[in-house]
Amino acid sequence: MSWERQISIKSKAELELMREAGIINAEALAAAAKACVPGASTADVDHAAESVLKHYKVTSPFKGVPGPIPFPASTCVSVNNILVHGIPSSKVILKEGDIVSVDCGTIYKGYVADSAFTIGVGEISAEARKLLEVTEASLYEGISKMIPGNRSGDVSAAVQAYVEKNGFYVTRQYTGHGVGRRMWEAPQVPNYGEPGQGVVLKSGMTIALEPMVLVGTEATKTISDGWGVSSADMSLTAHFEHSVAITEDGPRILTLLKDGTPPVSGIRLTDYRIV
């Protein structure tokens, strides 16, 4: 079966429900960002996000995902060389200079929002700061290509070109994806690709685009807990993600706060053609 036949096109009413899910998800990530301070544990970061989900009486699709063990938390909290899927732990204590990626999902009235950010803990190195800036900017470079008539390869190529131009690497093993009634839907949208290739983007498609960027190598390895994914050379990594709707008016980011701003950002959205 082709990717096109598996893709779910959302109605305007469904997009509004996904936007509501996205606002909650953004609020959870904003709370998590405030918890990323020296001396806090990654479990504290997860609890901050989960408290928002509990306030709205919603749940995360992450909790209980099958794997080496059922995933035990509402968020993935990944530090420094851990690219994605870090299990929050009371034993992992944040310190000045760390960078922390937090990925959160929300299920609201049957629809999923999925987004992520990476933030520095206190003062961070110049290399880490550049990594965060490039990774976040590459997300918006990709989003700016998410218009009807383009192809998924146009989005992927934009992410890859921006990252590699700045001297970093994109993972080849993990990808963005459709999102909606399920956390993972068609199509897959890698962070590398060729313009003009892939599925045709149509109004009503919803995609979680998520650049995952590494300083020293594109290669990764799974750590001993069976979930966390580290850069193979232990170099720094970063991860930014938004759930985005493709519309006739341009890409609509669903996982912004209610006022239209990201939960954590160094980017001015007005720099990009995004509604």
Image: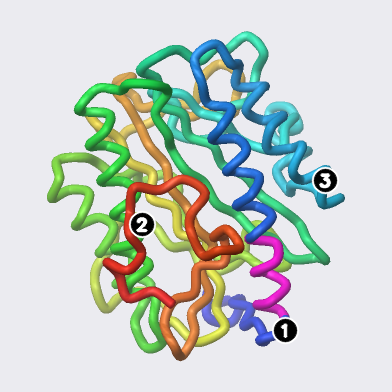
> Which quarter of the figure is the C terminus placed in?
bottom left
Q: CA distance from mark 3 to mark 2?
A: 29 Å
**Residue under pointer 1:** 13
| Res 54 label | none
Q: Is residue 17 magenta?
A: yes
Q: State the image quarter where residue 31 is shown.
A: top right
Residue at left offset 32%, top offset 41%: 213
Q: Amino acid at mark 2?
A: Leu
**Residue under pointer 3:** 55
Q: Give left or right: position of 153 versus 102.
A: left
Which mark is first along the chain, 1 or 3? 1
Q: Is residue 153 visible?
A: no
Question: In the rendered image of this protein, does residue 161 appear above or below residue 174?
Answer: below
Q: Is residue 242 magenta?
A: no
> Dot 2, crowdedness within 10 Å: few (<14), some or many (≥20)?
many
Which mark is first along the chain, 1 or 2? 1
Total count of labels:
3
Q: Secondary structure at mark 2?
A: helix
Q: Give left or right: position of 241 versus 131.
A: right
Please state which of the two labelled residues, at mark 3 or mark 2, is closer to the viewer. Answer: 3
> Which quarter of the figure is the N terminus placed in?
bottom right
Q: Find the magenta span and give its range.
A: 14-22
Q: Position of residue 175 (x, y in %)?
A: 45, 53
Please state which of the two labelled residues, at mark 3 or mark 1, is closer to the viewer. Answer: 3
Residue at left offset 34%, top offset 49%: 136
The answer to which of 133 and 73 lies nearer the viewer is 133
Prevailing secondary structure of the magenta residues: helix
**Residue under pointer 2:** 139
Q: Give left or right: position of 139 versus 46.
A: left
